[in-house]
């Protein structure tokens, strides 16, 4: 039951974070926080994440991440936040732009 509770809390937290991305899209620090949450949701809390850079273009903020899931090799990811869309969606991709 503890796992279910954690899952519900983390899904709720992610929903709250994503709902605030529209105004956060211009703030790299906040965007990085959203991206870290999304990566940890996907790969687990033991994942090590660092920001390698960011780019803003046409209402989109892309955060470049270095991600090391527990027991796995380092990988580079891009976390894209599109403030122009009503849903303010956050998308994780690999370096080539393929969705993860």
Image (cartoon, rainbow, N blue to C red):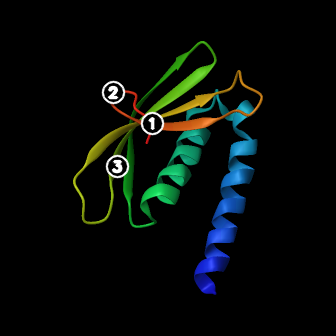
> The residue tagged with tag 1: helix, strand or loop?
loop
Q: Earlier in the sequence, mark 3 or mark 1?
A: 3
* Distance from the alpha carbon under mark 2 to that under mark 3: 15 Å
Q: Which mark is residue 99?
A: 1
The C terminus, quarter of image: top left
Q: Is residue 71 left or right of residue 61?
A: left
Instruction: Give the crowd class for mark 1: few <14, some 14-19, many >=20 residues within 10 Å.
Output: few
Across and down, in percent, residue 55 comes to: 47, 22
Label 1–label 2 contact, CB within 8 A: no
Instruction: Give the crowd class for mark 3: few <14, some 14-19, many >=20 residues within 10 Å.
Output: many
Across and down, in percent, residue 66 comes to: 33, 43
Give whichever of 33, 84 is nearer the camera: 84
Q: Is residue 100 left or right of residue 26?
A: left
Q: Which mark is residue 96?
A: 2
Q: Which residue occupies 33% across, 31% down?
A: 95
> To which quarter of the image does residue 6 belong?
bottom right
Q: Which residue occupies 48% across, 56% down?
A: 42
> The residue tagged with tag 2: helix, strand or loop?
loop
Which residue does the numbered mark 3 point to in the structure image? 67
> The residue tagged with tag 3: helix, strand or loop?
strand
Instruction: Give the crowd class for mark 2: few <14, some 14-19, many >=20 residues within 10 Å.
Output: few
Across and down, in percent, residue 90 comes to: 59, 37
The residue positioned farthest toward the top in the image shown: 58
The N terminus, quarter of image: bottom right
Give whichever of 65, 91 is nearer the camera: 91
Which is closer to the viewer, label 3 or label 1?
Answer: 1
Q: Which mark is residue 55?
A: none
Which is closer to the viewer, label 2 or label 3?
Answer: 2
> To which quarter of the image does residue 11 belong?
bottom right
Give whichever of 83, 42 is nearer the camera: 42
Above or below residue 26? Residue 17 is below
Label 3–label 1 contact, CB within 8 A: no
């Amino acid at each position: 039951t503890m796992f279910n509770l954690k899952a519900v809390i983390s899904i709720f937290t992610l929903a709250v974070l994503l709902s605030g991305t529209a105004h956060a899209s211009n703030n790299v620090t906040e965007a990085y926080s959203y991206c870290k949450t999304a990566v940890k949701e996907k790969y687990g809390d033991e994942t090590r994440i660092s920001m390698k850079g960011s780019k803003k273009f046409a209402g989109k903020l892309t955060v470049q991440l270095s991600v090391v899931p527990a027991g796995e090799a380092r990988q580079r990811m891009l976390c894209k936040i599109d403030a122009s869309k009503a849903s303010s969606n956050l998308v994780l991709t690999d370096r080539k732009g393929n969705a993860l």
